[in-house]
Amino acid sequence: GAPDAKHVIIAMGSVCQTIEEVIDYLNARGEKVGLVTVRLYRPFSAKHLIAALPETFKSIAVLDRTKEPGAIGEPLYVDVVSALRGTKFEDATIVGGRYGLGSKDTTPGAIISVYNNLKAEQPKNGFTISIVDDVTNLSLPITEEPDTTPAGTISCKFWGLGSDGTVGANKNSIKIIGDHTDKKVQAYFQYDSKKSGGVTVSHLRFGDKPIKSTYYVSKADFV
């Protein structure tokens, strides 16, 4: 993200590419946000984390894809807090949150809500994104859901019935585009638990720029 980022997310796993896409979108609009992607979790390297953080940041959100009942915080969050103790960053605001529980789709709007939370005077800690939590009220509200895919990316969405050939045809279509053009391609298929006769949804994207959208197609050019 921005070399002089004020608000930073630390995360690992599938959510990072969506965050990168959102950072490109927000920084193009004058925001100062960034991401630190953790690629090796244990042994945890505090010195590499500190070297990767911009001197300008004011607040950090650490995203975990787990919920540990009874723990004081999720694993990555606890490690980051511990790693920054006794360093020049120890007075920074650090909050933890959860994404992707129950395979919930993490959309650009959910990531924007994490950055909006960091801008608050008292950021919410222990939050959850992508669900409406009406029990503990710890979920972050999604106030906008922009299309952050790079310009020129075509998104398609196909509904079908299990065993009707829709998924096979879409796999072939995306392979042909990938093999015989210079375009980047992505395909994800949702299956019903009933197999034959259940509903299938095919999410296809292709375009000239790398596709980092690790979430369902919700704004399709072709349905």
Image (spheres, grey):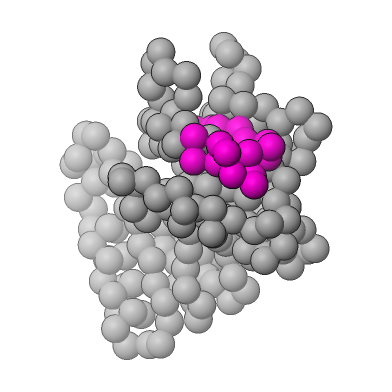
Q: Position of residue 182 (x, y in %)?
A: 40, 87
Assess whether residue 99 is covered by the magenta stretch. Answer: yes
Residue visible at 31% across and 46% down in the picture: 43
Horizontal relation, residue 106 to residue 95: left or right: left
Residue nearest the viewer, comparing 5 with 114: 5
- The correct choice, above or below, for 30 with respect to 192 in the image is below
Residue nearest the viewer, comparing 89 with 223: 89
Residue visible at 52% across and 70% down in the picture: 154
Image quadrant of residue 196? Answer: top left
Q: Position of residue 183 (x, y in %)?
A: 43, 82
Q: Position of residue 107 (x, y in %)?
A: 55, 47
Viewer can see residue 69:
yes
Farthest residue in the front direction? Answer: 86
Residue nearest the viewer, comparing 181 with 32: 32
Total marks in image? 0
Residue visible at 24% across and 34% down in the picture: 193
- The correct choice, above or below, for 184 with respect to 42 in the image is below
Residue visible at 42% across and 18% down in the picture: 71
Residue nearest the viewer, comparing 33 with 203: 33
In the rendered image, the quadrant that contains the N terminus is: bottom right
Q: Position of residue 77 (x, y in %)?
A: 49, 34
Horizontal relation, residue 168 to residue 70: left or right: left
Viewer can see residue 110:
no
> Over which residues does the magenta segment extend?
82-100
- The correct choice, above or below, for 79 with respect to 89 in the image is above
Assess whether residue 123 is covered by the magenta stretch. Answer: no
Image quadrant of residue 113? Answer: top right
- The correct choice, above or below, for 205 with respect to 133 in the image is below
